[in-house]
Amino acid sequence: MICVNDIEKEIGVFVPMEDDDVLVCRCEEVTKGEIRRAVHAGMTTIEEMRRFLRCGMGLCQGQTCGKLVKGIVAAELKINPLELEPAVSRAPMRPVEMKVMGKDGGQGGDAV
Amino acid sequence: MKKTAEVIIIGGGVNGCAAAYYMARRGLTDVIVLEGSDSIGHGGSSRNGGGVRQSGRDVRELTYCMWGIQNLWPGLSEELGVDVEYSQTGNLRLGKTEAHMKKLQQLADNARSCGLDVRMIDGKEVKELNPYLSEEVIGASWCPTDGHANPMLTTLAYYKRALELGVQFVKGAKVIKLRKMQGRARQVVTEDGTVFEADQILLVAGYESRAIARTVGIDIPMTTYFEEALVTEMQPHMFDMMLGTADADFYGHQCKHGSFVFGSECGLEEATDQSLTDLKTSSLTISAGSRAIMRYIPALKDAKLVRSWGGWLDMSIDRVPIMGKVTEVPGLILACGFTGHGFGTAPAVGYMLAQMAVGEETVVDLSALRYDRFVSDR
Ligand SMILES: Cc1cc2nc3c(=O)[nH]c(=O)nc-3n(C[C@H](O)[C@H](O)[C@H](O)COP(=O)(O)OP(=O)(O)OC[C@H]3O[C@@H](n4cnc5c(N)ncnc54)[C@H](O)[C@@H]3O)c2cc1C
């Protein structure tokens, strides 16, 4: 059980950093500063962070930035990155065109 | 962490977060929100298609749904300080056959009799509104005041703002029972045995509300249904309105940042028997959805799907939500059974739940949504 208000009190206010403009998620263009700010706005899990900022939700689905985001969130929360649940992987494993996906598992065959 | 407050809200979905915000906005900040999972919005609230739709709703919901669309949605982004991507760009429900058109006509007639502007348009007019649709579309119903918004941002924006205003949020707080004291709902007990106390308890925990309400003797006839959605990579801007079909084989829209979000089904959903914590998607739905979408929007055949997901719906037995104070258990307020369309109404619902908590008449009469409306018909 975690009380968000206690966490926010513990980590203190957002303090700007020199490298806040660094792009962390390149697919969705999310910066380090945005991620750090979101932690102070109450986004304390990777799940919330992805939904709030879209980091890791683009074409590569977080394969590049997943670890980085986790590190930044953990540092801001002053915890070990291992304490953060990783993002859930979702089907399909790689981006697939609709015309290809539509061929599977039905009577539809060639829909178009 | 405080354990006693004026109000406890069970469930940190869009309805619980909106209720917390509207309470705080009117000065009632001594509120605790208990969310069972580790993330706010872990339930349907972050998994839905984002439809802010009036068309197709039961009369009992339509009044407050329309009230929310007229009074709350338009200013919501500004009010919460987060762009929730609300876009009032209409809803086209498409038909390809005479049977489809008959069905759409009936829905449109129903809606109009409740005062909602839904009209039937022919294939040519559909094409003018949306040139990307298949030649096979012969007509549609058109509701210009429907629209869509980003459900994840809406939920988290209400959460963020309520947090800023002083509401206490506790995550990982799975409630297992309520306890009455001196005839009133008073205590809320979580899985690890922690006891929270409040003067009023608001139960907005989706389907799980049923098991919790039962611990104080109230049973709400609800079932579950697993629904899935998918999203494409960013596409060039094509159209803004929400789409649906007479056959209900898919629905969806293009989001602000370019992706298309669609909901679809494979036809075997009724038989889903996985547990409520199991959110695995079926291997069939994403393909069935792709076929349905391409039959109506052929231009999307090369669009790549990047992700699919699913979520549980809290289906009320008569398909209309259950909302209001419980007479037998003073202090308990219920809001559940949103039956797969509780996102679009969340601002209005949250607003009215806050009114109930402060003892005010709700802006729209909700007596038709009472929990005790269910009677045997045999
Ligand atoms: C795929 C899909 C598509 C949809 N499309 C649309 C759409 O286009 N338009 C629309 O209007 N609606 C749509 N919906 C429905 C909509 O998402 C829901 O009606 C709405 O989110 C309900 O919000 P809620 O806050 O009542 O419930 P939820 O979001 O389910 O929130 C309930 C919360 O309670 C928590 N909880 C559960 N049990 C406990 C417990 N024991 N203790 C503490 N907390 C608990 C859950 O973790 C959850 O966070 C869709 C749903 C799905 C799944």
Image (cartoon, coloured by chain):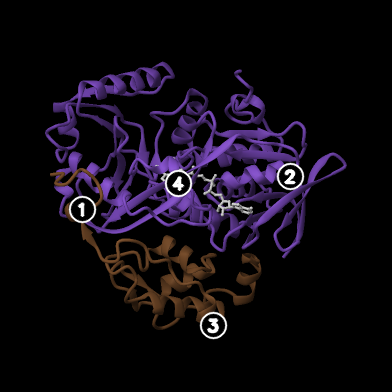
Chain colours: A brown, B purple
- Asked whether the residues under the numbered discs 4 and 1 touch, taking CB atoms below 8 Å apart as contact, a structural biologist would say no
Number of residues whose C-alpha sits closer than 10 Å to that of mark 2, classed few (under 14), some (14–19) or many (20 or more): some
Residue at the spot x=47%, y=27% of the render?
B62
Count of marks placed on residues: 4
**The quadrant where residue A19 appears:** bottom left
Taking depth in this image into account, of B48 and B275 the one nearest to the observer is: B275
User: Label for residue A98?
Assistant: 1
Circle 3 or circle 2, nearest the eye: 2
State the separation of the CA atoms marked 4 and 1. Answer: 24 Å
User: Residue B255, can we see it?
Assistant: no
Q: Give the chain letter at badge 2.
A: B
User: Label for residue A80?
Assistant: 3
User: Label for residue B215?
Assistant: 2
Q: Which kind of residue does numbered mark 2 sit on? A: Thr
- Asked whether the residues under the numbered discs 2 and 4 touch, taking CB atoms below 8 Å apart as contact, a structural biologist would say no
Ligand 1 lies under 8 Å from the Cβ of mark 1: no
At mark 1, the secondary structure is: helix
Number of residues whose C-alpha sits closer than 10 Å to that of mark 3, classed few (under 14), some (14–19) or many (20 or more): few
At mark 3, the secondary structure is: loop
**Residue A77 spot, x, y in % from top left:** 55, 77
Q: Which kind of residue does numbered mark 1 sit on? A: Met
Residue at the spot x=27%, y=19% of the render?
B102
Q: Which kind of residue does numbered mark 3 sit on? A: Asn
State the separation of the CA atoms marked 1 and 3. Answer: 40 Å
